[in-house]
Image: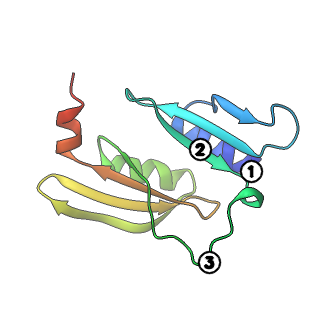
Amino acid sequence: MTAAVAWYAEVFGTPPYFVRPEQGPLQYAEWRFGDDEDEFALMDARFRPVLAQPGGALVSIHVDNIQSAIDRLTSLGATVFDPITQRGEGWSSASVSDPFGNLLGLIQSPHWAARHAD
């Protein structure tokens, strides 16, 4: 967990704003980022719920340049899981596996960008 928190701190460029416990081995960490203050959390696998089957959800983060994001993540040790795929005009998605086996989705969308323009 400590290594994963350090890796994501490098990815996001900031340490988590919230960790538990505050002292001792990390069990949970949260980051806020972007204008919307979206949250990203990591939880030690010992505390995840037991599921009958694995889920199929993938949470994705919007990026301004998907190729640059893939390049940066892979330079930090991520592996491309789903390569960049055009989903529509100007809209692409991809996913990587972090060094700990978690999937991280990426989206580059002009629709999202237009809704969040200044």
- Residue drawn at x 51%, y 70% is 55
Left or right: 46 in relation to 13? right
| Residue 26 location (% of width, % of height) | 79, 43
According to the picture, the residue beneath numbered tag 3 turns out to be 52
Eye-nearest disc, 2 or 3: 3
Image quarter hosting the C terminus: top left
According to the picture, the residue beneath numbered tag 2 turns out to be 41
Residue neighbourhood size for the residue with mark 3, other residues' Cα within 10 Å, grouped as few (<14), some (14–19), many (≥20): few
Q: Name the residue type under label 3.
A: Ala
Q: Name the residue type under label 1.
A: Met
Dot placed on the residue nearer the N-terminal end, 2 or 3: 2
Left or right: 82 in relation to 24? left
Closer-to-camera residue (84/16): 16
Q: Dot 2 lies on which element?
A: strand
According to the picture, the residue beneath numbered tag 1 turns out to be 1
Dot placed on the residue nearer the N-terminal end, 1 or 3: 1
Eye-nearest disc, 1 or 2: 2
